[in-house]
Amino acid sequence: MLRFFLGRLAILIPTFLGVSLIAFSFIRLLPGDPVMLMSGERVMSEERHAQIMHDLGLDRPMYVQYFDYLGNVLTGDLGTSIVSKRPVFDDFLSLFPATLELSICAIIVAMCLGIPAGVIAAVKRGTWFDQSIMGIALVGYSMPIFWWGLLLMIFFSGYLQWTPVSGRISLMYFFPPVTGFMLIDSLLSGQAGAFKSAVSYLILPTVVLATIPLAVIARQTRSAMLEVLGEDYVRTARSKGLSPWRVVGIHALRNALIPVITTIGLQVGVLLAGAILTETIFSWPGIGKWMVDAVFKRDYAVVQGGLLMIAGVIMLVNLAVDVTYGFINPRIRH
Amino acid sequence: MKKISLLLAATALASVMATSAWSKTLVYCSEGSPEGFDPSLYTAGTTFDASSRTAYSRLVEFKHGSTEIEPGVAESWTISPDGLEYTFKLRAGVKFQTTDYFTPTRELNADDVIFSFERQIKADHPWHKYVEGASWEYAAGMGFPELIKSIEKVDDLTVKFVLNKPEAPFIANLGMDFASIMSKEYADKLTAEGKVAQLNQMPLGTGPFTFVAYQPDAVIRYKANPDYYKGKEKIDDLVFAITTDAAVRAQKLKAGECHVMPYPNAADVAELKADPNLTVMEEEGLNVAYLAYNTQMAPFDKPEVRKALNMAVNKQAIIDAVFQGAASIAKNPIPPTMWSYNDAIEDDKYDPDAAKKALEAAGVKDLKMKIWAMPVSRPYMLNARRAAELMQADLAKVGVEVEIVTHEWAEYLKLSSDVKRDGAVMLGWTGDNGDPDNFLDTLLGCEAVGGNNRAQWCNEEFNKLVKAAKQTSDQAERAKFYQDAQVIFKREAPWNTIDHSLVFLPVSKKVSGFVQDPLGIHRFDGADIAE
Amino acid sequence: MSSATVKTGHPSALAEFWYYFSRNKGAVLGFAVFVIVLLLAVLAPIVAPHAPSEQVREKLLLPPSWMAGGDASYLLGTDAVGRDILSRLIYGARFSLFIGLVVVTLSVISGVLIGLVAGYFRGRVDIVIMRVMDIILAFPSLLLALVLVAVLGPGLLNAMIAIALVNQPHFVRLTRASVMAEREKDYVIASRVAGAGTLRIMFLTILPNCLAPLIVQATLAFSAAILDAAALGFLGMGAQPPTPEWGTMLAEAREFIQRAWWVVTFPGLAILVTVLAINLMGDGLRDALDPKLKRS
């Protein structure tokens, strides 16, 4: 098992190097340079431009910049944002919990609704229930979530005024960020109503972000379940007179969940991509919005640092999924 | 470092929390995150709102709601007859803010003033490069490094600026955000602790509000500065809720989640006006949008061709479609709220037939041209692409075929300055200090060709006038020069002046004493809020 | 003899396919909607009541015709510069289908080629190729596409290239897996023994037997491409205005969210319906082509 784990980890190293090279070179290929943007409509003289490029180290040969960058990354230094002039790693750390909180809530919602829906649909295969669940799932799967978010916002925040418009918690509440997770921090603060407020701000973004993973999980659970239900040992159990739900509960579900776990792991990338759109719509202060802003502002340091960190997170989650999968299912450990 | 700042924030928060139950809190839905908290490093209004207009004050200040200058921490000043020496007498007893991260031991004096400016203009100053990539954009843009010969301490409360050449707009420049006064004592303490970057993260000045905490991309909190030299503000807490999307800001304002919001979508203004709980303030912005021809390239080197093209464009239609009417037609290169605006000038009337004839008379046939449209929304031009499409349709009617060109914003700014650029460029300008020089010489002077002068237009007659105005400190005399310069501008038509946008500022009716500022900044000193 | 089997084999395979496909009512519905969208796109100049970029300055932001203040000749209303929304949506269908087609073509061709090479030759080539694919898959696809488009410059063509690039690893993986499964099967070994060349074996012997999962994946990629392109357009990095691409229309309409719901609602609905139709078809295709799920 340890060997399997180390093997997987070893594969990550060249991938990570590749990722860092891509993150680094992409940003050097961007047209226009960030120094020009600093002055806006006001034109900067050539000498000043050259001076600032020099100060930022952007005039050195690419490979020098790359190895320098790589060295810094290994010591935990992702550089300094060209726009805010703050360390990129600090910004990442302070913004990531917001994205993580949103993503975790979304995946929990998706699992809690998606797995039961998939199981029931499989057991009741062909009924109107199955068909409508799968119909809804397919609509969710086909949803342009940026539009979906706007619609929900117009309706629930604008028209009904049930949910707040944007932000993470009502500004009435004010407490130090201990964990960075607003739900936990609001409880820790001990302020009455804070937790409720945090929840109310989280609902719409969570629903929007959960939409696609929910659909995928429901569909995947259903088909995995159908496959298992068709296998001999389940048929045998059934023929022995076990009630269908017992069969499902004891035998089928456990085996069906194995591919579902992989699916959930694969949703991390989907979630982070979704976070880009969701955070943009709801002004959610997370890394998705941070990255989009950085791309538009040509903030070299933030784009490359952010790409690297996000890819790193996805790779680690995939590793965790691989290992879990290997743990549950020893056959793939070779 | 990270831990410590968190801890500091935590204690700061605790102290605020204790009073929050009965405090007066004003919430401002700001349009974006500040780039940092040292205003001299940046150029964005968003940053100024969150730093210089809250935490800091300056030698001289713009009067609330106008472009006129009034004394700030300098209570008076004298200018030598040759216009080269400016001596400022500082107010006595101005206290710096006391925060959890710094307790001042002395009041503001000449050292602080000298520190605040020298760090920006002296390349060998220890604070000149205290953050990576510090470029002191505004000080450079206003020419301070070349302009200022020296800054001398006469005594603790007297400081003298010696200039290399007379510069009439100098006093107005000192009211700008980059001229905010820092605490040298705070800076020295940070140097000693090896935490210089904190100057840009936790501001400390003599302004009306004391910085409390910043959560990136989410919230900035301030409390009223009890030691403010003009007296403590009426509100206790000031909160910036960062909300980048204009439609969302409007939603939040209507839902009562904030009390003031800048930059509403033009499309939302009518609805906001109809809301009984809101007042929508409006004012002509200190800006202009223009289409600059390349006057060095045929056939745009002929004024009659440029004038004919100007006549072919229906500016009112642009204002209707892009601004939903929330802008006024520009006839001069400076906005009407600015002194020296020449209202006697008549605009080129929209007249496609006359334009067609004028083009024929100038011997121009089957003209094909490019129009550059900015890829970003600016206050003076919300949607350049849409405006360009309208111009394209208008010009097609007089037989001119237009191709719309755009580039990524940084590229656009760079390429549009090129003397050999092909096509007319849409761009604009927002005034920095309320001085006409800041438009007329900066954008149309001869030295600006290949730079800010996107029309690449060098007219000696015009240039002489704007240069003369710079050397004079008598305002009436300066106004005369500028008015004449505007006449020449209109005759030569290097630009098609498009619009001055109206700036809307929806405010909750609970808020009183809040004034809209023509300089495009948002300041909360003097504001009060009803429960 | 061989010609006889082809003659009888081919139609019956198609008939079998159609039998399974048509049993799935959703798939048939999806197919019908897709055909309608396709027809609208092809016949746009005839069907659309107005030109997509025609601006009527007296009729800015007209509501849909059934509402008070609506105009019968503008069924779904007009946008901020007085263009007919229905006509823009109809022309927009051209862009969305075109995007889907180009992206799928690009990513299938490149993905299949690379996958064939990796799966057939194995060894070092395979390792390098798969590492590169891992690297691409390590980024969230939309983020990677966003940065790529920023590098290449915003625009429809570049958006399509970027989306194709981030989609193509799926085809590589799928092809490689199928090739590896097929490679050692008897019929491949037989044709190798018979002296068939590498290219012949790769393209004529192995590839046709991996087609079913590729077709299903291509359908999914088609709808994903439309969604991604719309998302990029929404973020301002896809097709540039005034192109009537649906995502770009949505981005332009955002500022009217409070005042004119129709400029926001219809483009999104168009995206949803089209993508849904294609996904329904994709499900039907999978059921019809995947022998494992065919039974019962």
Image (tube, coloured by chain):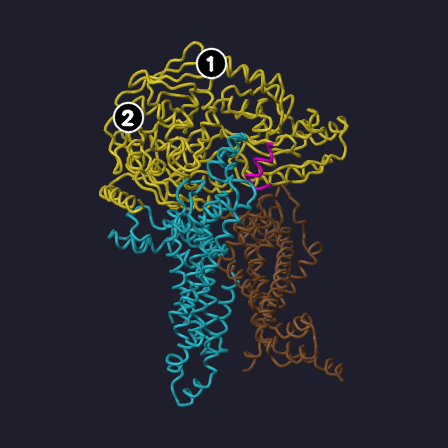
Chain colours: A cyan, B yellow, C brown
Q: Which of the 4 image quadrants contains residue C10?
A: bottom right
The amino acid on which the numbered mark 2 sits, given as a three-letter code, is Tyr
Which residues fall within the magenta stretch?
B407-417
Residue at 46 percent of width and 86 percent of height: A232
Q: Give the secondary structure at mark 1.
A: loop
Q: Name the residue type under label 1.
A: Ser
Q: Report, in whole angstroms, how far the alpha carbon at label 1 lies from the one at label 2.
A: 30 Å
Q: Is residue B1 left or right of residue B381?
A: left
Please report, as a chain letter, where disc 1 is located: B
User: In the image, residue A217 lies at what x, y percent?
Assistant: 45, 68
* Residue occupied by mark 2: B229
Q: Where does label 1 land, which residue? A: B473
Above or below for C30 versus A22: below
Q: Decide if residue C29 is on the left or right side of residue B139.
A: right
Q: Are marks 1 and 2 on the same chain?
A: yes
Quick one: C74 or B482, which is closer to the camera? B482
Is residue C74 placed above or below B61 in the rendered structure?
below
Tell me the element at label 2.
Answer: loop
Quadrant where the image shows the C terminus of chain B: top left
Is residue C270 visible in the rendered structure shown here? no
Residue B256 lies, in percent from the top left, at: 37, 44
Taking the magenta stretch, the answer to whether it contains residue C96 is no
How would you classify the magenta stretch by its main secondary structure? helix
